[in-house]
Image: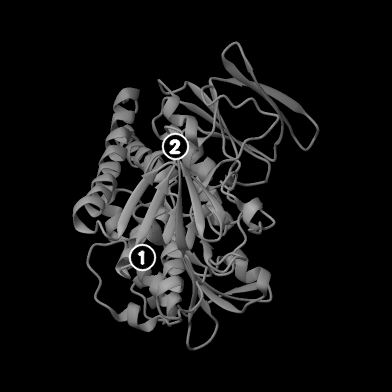
Amino acid sequence: MEKFDLVVIGGGPAGYAGAMRAIDFRKKVLLIEKHKIGGAGLHDGVLSSKTLWEHSMKVNTIRETIPDFKVDFEEIFNVVRDSIFERKTQMKVHLKLLEEAIEPELFKFEKGFAKIIDKHHVEITKDSGEKIIVETDFILIATGSRPRYLPTIPIDEQIIVTSDGIKNFTELPKSMVILGAGVIGCEFATIFSNYGQTKVFLIDKAERILPFEDEDIAQTVTENLTRNGCHVHHGATFMRMEIKNGKVEYELEYKDKKREIFTVDKALISVGRIPNVEGIGFEETGLKLNEKNALWDDDTQTNISNIYAAGDVTMDIALVNVGERESRHAVVRMFGPAVKRISYENISTIMFLNPEVAAVGMSEQDVYKKGISVKIVKLDYSTNARAIAMRKTKGFFKIIVTNDNGMKILGMRAVGEHASSAIQAVSYLVHTNQGIRELADMMHPHPSIIEGIQECLRMLLGKSIYKSSVFKDKLKAYVCENGVCTPLEHL
């Protein structure tokens, strides 16, 4: 029986990162993946959907000057396939060279289904049916998640699909409904409406999409979806969905009890994800589950001291960067020096919408709910030279700071072209609990989107180039206390 320092179950982003971090500590590692290396994050998740988004945004830009421009569906998915192949090849070649040439005494990869027998033994069932058992000091579970199915909807991954079934399309549908107006649902609504060949309907039971974000963000995204021909069913209660004659029929009920029936070519169900915990041996080993039926963990450590969990299988925050960070943290806890707990408070995020949305820290509605006294500045994209040069002036920057002389940054939102490129500097200030003066006084490249952040900070310091008293519709600054907001006229 072969013995390892660490067995990692799951070859997605979290498991892969954890295995590589263990090699840094010169530990003997076994990485097990039952299906495809890279997991959902590579094949059916982030990489494929973001490749689609990037391609669709380019097409959307062309359509601004050539409204009738159309793209061949095979061309679209060739781009996606090339992207997946490139990343998959990188990962597979990396593993193969590690295993056979670079670190053969430290690293081994097995394809098969892993089941934990007890805290120190894992059984691997290979595709051939052969079973082997290995011994290990530590186990890292990183088995990821999958799209949630609704029992009342006949999901066949052909006509009614989850995000996993998008790749089964053979052409751009003429019409499509998306159930779920969260980030993923809005991202796919953006993608398909960008191409201009699909009439997209988005079912939103709330009064607005993206209810976890501020209203001005939701409004900007909604306006752009509508401009692209997407129809949002606001305040609609989903009643049923069926496949009839190869098409999708769905029924909605509104607040006035009026019902409507619609028929479209395809449907995408985007109502969250569930963790892959079945069959890994949690019942036999006594691993606890949390209220989400995911693996319970305390700073990546499960209730069994030598078994850790990272990524979507814990359902803390289902993001690739979070899963990678958690797995690396878990390995350091196993083999490295004592480290402080992971903080989830100030994670930078990007929503791939039109325009893109970047966020870190608290939102405006967050500070209102908590009754925090703050200063808020908001700068329109139309005042930014780079946005003007790109002819992409729809959007804004918004920064929230404490209402004191220190003006510590509590949160930021950037909505617009290249928004994600503007967030990192502010994320660092939030992470390190710093104020705004250093970033305000730096010489930023020109023209650049990040200059919009600099101008926001200058507004707070009372030394902006454009004055809010002149451009009242473009620059806004106000103090909010106890839910009451007062303009800062002196800026």
Q: What residue type is disc 2 on?
A: Glu
Going 30% across and 68% down the picture, which residue do you hit?
A: 24
Is 220 positioned to the left or the right of 274 in the image?
Answer: left
Q: What residue type is disc 1 on?
A: Ala
Tally the marks: 2
Q: Which residue occupies the foreground of this view, 40 or 210?
A: 40
For label 2, the residue is 130
Q: Which residue occupies the foreground of this view, 333 or 352?
A: 333
Q: Residue 22: percent from the left, percent from the top?
A: 36, 65
Q: Residue 469: percent from the left, percent from the top?
A: 46, 72
Going 46% across and 22% down the picture, which residue do you hit?
A: 173
Is 11 positioned to the left or the right of 220 in the image?
Answer: left
- The numbered mark, 2 or 1, whose residue comes first in the sequence reads 1
Q: Which residue occupies the foreground of this view, 278 or 56?
A: 278
Q: Nearer the viewer, mark 2 or mark 1?
A: 2
Q: Is residue 217 visible?
A: yes
Location of the C terminus by quadrant is bottom left
Going 50% across and 36% down the picture, which residue do you hit?
A: 163
Q: Secondary structure at mark 1?
A: helix
For label 1, the residue is 22
